[in-house]
Amino acid sequence: MGLPTVPRWWKLYQDPTLDALVNEALQNNRDLRVASANLAEAHAVLLERQDSRLPVTTVSSDIGYGSTVSDQIAAALDQTGVRTGPRYTAGLSSGWRLDLFGQIARSIQAAHADEAATLAAEDSVRVVVAAETTRAYLDSCGFAARAEVAQRSLAVVTRSLELKTALRDAGGTTSLDVARSAALMEQARAAIPAIEAARQNALYELAVLTGRPPDHLSPPATGCVSVPQLTAPIPIGDVTALLQRRPDIREAERRLESSTARIGVAMASLYPTVSILGSVASSAPTVDGMRDHGSIVWGVGPALSWHFPNRSAARAQIAKAEAQEVAALARFDAVILTALKDVKQALATYAAAVRRQSALAMAVQQSREAARLAGVGRRAGAISELDALDAQRRNVEAEAMLASAEADVASDQVALFRSLGGGWEQAPAVRRPVITRAVDAAR
């Protein structure tokens, strides 16, 4: 399909300001902070699952008042009253669950896959952030260029109105012609505020994407007045590289792996749970008495837990896990098809925009030549100044259409780069906020 893709594709525009903005967005964007926190949570869940393989030890102690079963047995044997008084107890117990049927191993496998899927989801956010930051910057440049053309258009029709007004006063034209020129001037004037507002909105969006308040965008970002152009063909790559690169495909694949692992977790519930348990405890009416051999009890041995004969709940969990696997597989297939569709649509749209831009560039070339010839004729006295101004007006209209087409091409370029799934590779680390709680501050 073409040249191999470039990880930091926005550098193809060779615009240092754009490079700095995308780098800032990849570090400070708030959606990326959320995705980074989600990844940290997934990693914590994985550590929790891995700890399930280790023994669990519990230390306990208590002090109470009253009698125990041992006191009652001793009183019955000695034919005395039951001792009542303080009782000191301390103990230690440890248990180690044997993963004979793979439930723990499968849960760890599922947690691994979930963490990988969450990482892929974070990379998907990086793709979006890089693309939208680039789009917002290019939009601001495009609207600035269109605003400049609109101002020139207003200047031309304003001069034409002035000439026609003077000509009417001299009896050379009618008030109808003047009114038409005045309407053209007001139409040209009315187009400017919408363009300026659109540029400002693009700058506001750019500021928020980089993690700044809308009114605090860095000055270099506001200085772009023309759309940056690519100096080389867009590297497309091949289908295999696309499937390996797009993080949403990787996320769907890892979700499928996690769903498959959870079937094993559910199936293990059909079988008994076996653990090795050990405990030692001491109980005595005095603290010193806890050291006596007769006050100490201990035990070690296997423990078995098994839910039967009613295992319908376990089988329902298995059916649920299997249904989730089928759904995950369908999502995986859908994501692949969507990825291929996105690239095809983006290529078609971009190719059409390039053809339109090329045609309008030729139109501008011809209209500029016409305006130049009209100027020559005006200086030679062959045509009137109004005819020369009309040629200039048509040239400005063609340039306005070209400026809009160039902005469309830039937007379609970003859409194509986004569909290719690049932008997450070699990304800087996300700056996560440091949370200071009231309790921490008081210490």
Image: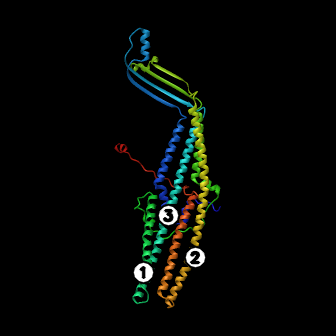
Q: Name the amino acid type tagged 3.
A: Leu
Question: Residue at the spot x=44%, y=60% of the render?
Answer: 207
Question: Residue at the spot x=61%, y=46% of the render?
Answer: 329
Tell whether label 2 touches label 1 (CB within 8 Å): no
| Label 2 crowd bin: few (<14), some (14–19), many (20+), radius 10 Å | few
| Label 1 crowd bin: few (<14), some (14–19), many (20+), radius 10 Å | some
x and y percentages locating residue 236 in the rendered image: 62, 61
x and y percentages locating residue 352 in the rendered image: 59, 67
Q: Secondary structure at mark 2?
A: helix
Q: Secondary structure at mark 1?
A: helix
Question: Residue at the spot x=53%, y=32% of the render?
Answer: 55
Q: Quadrant of residue 348?
A: bottom right
Q: Which residue is mark 3?
A: 18
* Residue farthest along the bottom direction in this orientation: 381
Q: Secondary structure at mark 3?
A: helix
* Residue farthest along the top direction in this orientation: 79
Q: Earlier in the sequence, mark 3 or mark 2?
A: 3
